[in-house]
Image (tube, rainbow, N blue to C red):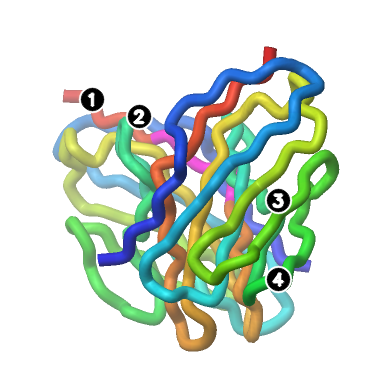
Amino acid sequence: DVKVTQSSRYLVKRTGEKVFLECVQDMDHENMFWYRQDPGLGLRLIYFSYDVKMKEKGDIPEGYSVSREKKERFSLILESASTNQTSMYLCASSPTGGKQPQHFGDGTRLSIL
Amino acid sequence: AQRVTQPEKLLSVFKGAPVELKCNYSYSGSPELFWYVQYSRQRLQLLLRHISRESIKGFTADLNKGETSFHLKKPFAQEEDSAMYYCALKGLGNEKLTFGTGTRLTIIP
């Protein structure tokens, strides 16, 4: 069974802090994704990566960056956290090709004070 | 550009009644469509996808290319169906998913 693990379920940070959200998958998937989930807005793609050291912007990349140094790990970075980045963050992974679904982690609820 | 519309944010249905969650999409090619579900305090998980043509937990969804719809249906709602449901689209040759805004389904006992 695919396992996508996000390092924290809940996180509280202060405005201006640099914040790291970590995600690890154990199925050797090429693709990894970061979304934020907000009521009434659904899931919006922040960044995704289709290979080590490769990344592409999603629909709402502003204020975020990512890092993928190893295939199994995809990090989301908030360079200078702001209150409008308070949200639920979901990580997902999928293999390339075919018609494979994305598998999601439990999510990290991030609050920026 | 690809777009997914779920017109209902909230839907309440009595137990035993039929359920239909609407999903319409906009995409110029042949899309892959998915329904994801998130039960309370659980992770988002795949419910079904159109290529499988299967019924999961009594739910079915048919891709209607003429109406560009992928509505989720169940003939008799159960209390455990209460959850958040998201429709999602993947374009040809594209690994990204575009999600709708979701519908929160509540089954009334």
Q: Do labels 2 and 4 share a chain?
A: no
Q: Name the residue under label 3.
A: A46
Which residue range is magenta in the image? B100-104
Residue A93 can be seen, yes or no: yes
* Residue that extends furthest to the top in the rendered view of this protein: A113
Callout in the foreground (2, 3): 3
CA–CA distance in space, label 2 to label 1: 7 Å
The answer to whether residue A60 is left or right of residue B96 is right
Q: Mark 4 points at which residue?
A: A53
Query: Which residue corresponds to the image point at 73% horizontal and 67% vertical from the top-left?
Result: A55
Q: Position of residue A49 (x, y in %)?
A: 66, 67
Circle 3: element type: strand
Q: Is B46 or A64 nearer to us in this picture?
A: A64
Q: Are marks 2 and 3 on the same chain?
A: no
Q: Residue B108 — which label?
A: 1
Query: Which residue corresponds to the image point at 36% horizontal and 35% vertical from the top-left?
Result: B105
Residue contact at pointers 2 and 1, CB within 8 angstroms:
yes
Q: Do labels 3 and 4 share a chain?
A: yes
The subunit carrying tag 4 is A
Q: Where is residue B74 in the image (x, y as percent from the top left)?
A: 25, 53
Which comes sooner in the sequence, label 3 or label 4?
A: 3
The subunit carrying tag 3 is A
Indicate whether residue B33 is drawn in magenta: no
Q: Are marks 1 and 4 on the same chain?
A: no
Q: Position of residue A30 (x, y in %)?
A: 54, 76
B74 to B34, vertically: above or below: above
Q: Residue A55 — which label?
A: none
Q: Name the residue under label 2.
A: B12
